[in-house]
Image: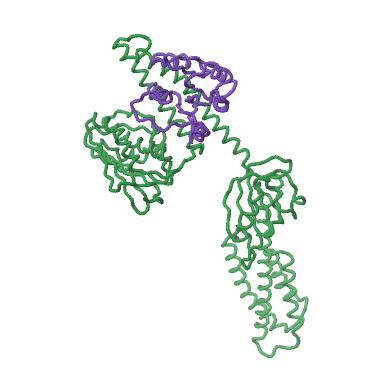
Amino acid sequence: MTKIPEYIYRQSRVGLFILSLLMVFLFGVIDTVTGPQFSLSIFYLIPILFATWFIGRRYGFIISIVSAATWLAADLISTGQYTFSIVPLWNASIRLGFFIIISYAFSEIKKAGARNSLLASIVEYSSDAIIGVSREGIIFSWNEGAEQVFGYSSSEAVGRSANFLVPPDRDNEEKQFLEKANKGEYIERMDTVRFRKDGTLIDVSMSVSPIKDESGYIIGSSSIIRDITSQRQLESLKEDFINKVSHELRTPLTSIREAVSQVLDGIHGEITPAQKEFLNIPFQEIDRMKRLINNLLEVSKIEADMIILKKEVFDLVQVTREIIIFFRPQADKTGIELRENINSDKFEVLADKDKIKEIIINLVGNAIKFTKKGYIEISIREKSGLIEFIITDTGPGIPEEELPKIFDKFHQFEDYEGRIREGSGLGLVITKDLIRLHGGEIWVESKINIGTTFTFTLPGDIKS
Amino acid sequence: MPKKILIADDDTNIVKLLAARLKANNYDVIAAFDGAQTLRMAHEAKPDLIILDIRMPAGSGISTYEKLIMSSNTALIPVIFITAYANEEIRHKVTELGAEGFITKPFDADELLGMVRHALKEKVDEEPGPRKSPYWVLEEEK
């Protein structure tokens, strides 16, 4: 909605008020001296001309003429002499009252008109198609954006049923929109497909909202439709690119890894312990590179909105216990205790099982990597309708100034001995994004030399 | 008698390496380098298992697989897909079609061999899962 700035109102009202007080006094005095009359004397014409000019400047030519005419009319109908000395002042205030009321009413009409034409021009020149449809589904308004998006001119489209843009396989869609809008409901940015005049199909994103008259009765609906075809093409190009790059990176890596692995396994003849030791270096580095490529791919996919969660109901406790079993040998090797603190036997969640596994493996893996003594504890609990998953370790801790940065891309922090920790710097980014996609949150608390606690939440709508 | 495995991949290095790995584990190996050749060899040589790359010239892995399961001669040959595409949609598609396994490159030799043994119903250390066959085979067995 257009809003006329407050100060313009205030300025005009204060000005009018002071002016009218002055005029009541001035004209009262003039009227007392001259008596009721309609004359062309300078005393009479100057104030009228002044007021007409003032009003005209502020509200326009027509308004000022009409106001001046009412002023003159008051004089034309009053005749004879004043009996009481208050009468001229009274007359003057009545006149001015009319003057102000008329000019104010006109100015409001003019402002409303300006507002409407401003709104109309915003609608008209919007690059999005904005279409007005009656309750019965007949198009009654069609802006320039609609002409560009659909190729039909306003005269071709107005009066037709809104159905003529809908492809046959989505026949019911417009009817549903209409029903919803007629009930006063809104449809927010729905992606769908529509026909253009030239017969091509375009991807559009559309929002539909009811149009109400002053009494609140729904007289139709307005649809705002944006052509997202080129946006879609760009997205699919990006998707292709990511898939292609990952394919091209993985293919040579496969051969390198397998060749090294076969020599290491002795398939092509015995190798000496020294050869084995040195071939293990590329072998491990290839695995690191493989992890990096996988992580990069995943980050790009998340950023390109290519991740589609395959949600199912599963038991979080069982998944967690499997992961604990998987990590146990590694924990035993370092000499740390890997324990669980789960009160319930079952915590059912509706989520993408593979992604949740990835999140937990990532967080527990990090804890195992950094914790050299003490324990790692995994707890799951329910708190105000959410499922909280908590991983606490007694590792070196994260410095306070690093804490806000640990979910940043490529952030690798030094431990307290000043060594840069290995890793791609992408694990926590992916973890955070995957949790966010599930509608959860993750946060971290940490104290140097005491330990770190990562907590993430998942919506717990599904309960056992 | 050693089981015969058909490797279908247009990357000769991969074929060479896979062949070496499988031969070292006492399998017979034959190779095809495109979709059409894979179909021909599957019909002629009757392998016990096919390891199929998804991106190949003259018929992608998926279209080749669809042709394989349409023919009664080859429908029952288990197929393991191997691909450098880490696309989950492809994985879901081929498992739905009834593929025996799906491995992404770079693969781990132990993982691959485990899957091969499982597909050939050889003895494996772990408990074998339910066999995923093409859907009409499941119906016939009922």
Q: Is residue A337 above or below residue A121?
A: above
Q: Residue at x 69, y 44 (%)?
A: A195
- The answer to whether any part of residue A46 appears in the image is yes
- The answer to whether any part of residue B90 appears in the image is no
In percent of width and height, residue B77 lies at 50, 24
Tell me the quarter of the picture where residue A237 sits. Answer: top right
Q: Is residue A427 above or below residue A384?
A: above
- Camera-nearest residue between A287 and A55: A287
What is the drawing colour of chain B? purple
Tell me the quarter of the picture where residue A398 sits. Answer: top left
Number of labels in the image equals: 0
Left or right side of A418 for A429: right
Q: Is residue A47 above or below residue A140?
A: below
In percent of width and height, residue B97 lies at 52, 32
- Camera-nearest residue between A150 and B25: B25
- Camera-nearest residue between A437 and A445: A437
- Camera-nearest residue between A199 and A4: A199
Quadrant containing the N terminus of chain A is: bottom right
Tell me the quarter of the picture where residue A58 sits. Answer: bottom right
- Outermost residue on the bottom side: it is A83
In percent of width and height, residue A19 lies at 62, 71
What is the drawing colour of chain A? green
The type of colouring in the image is: by chain
In percent of width and height, residue A357 lies at 38, 37
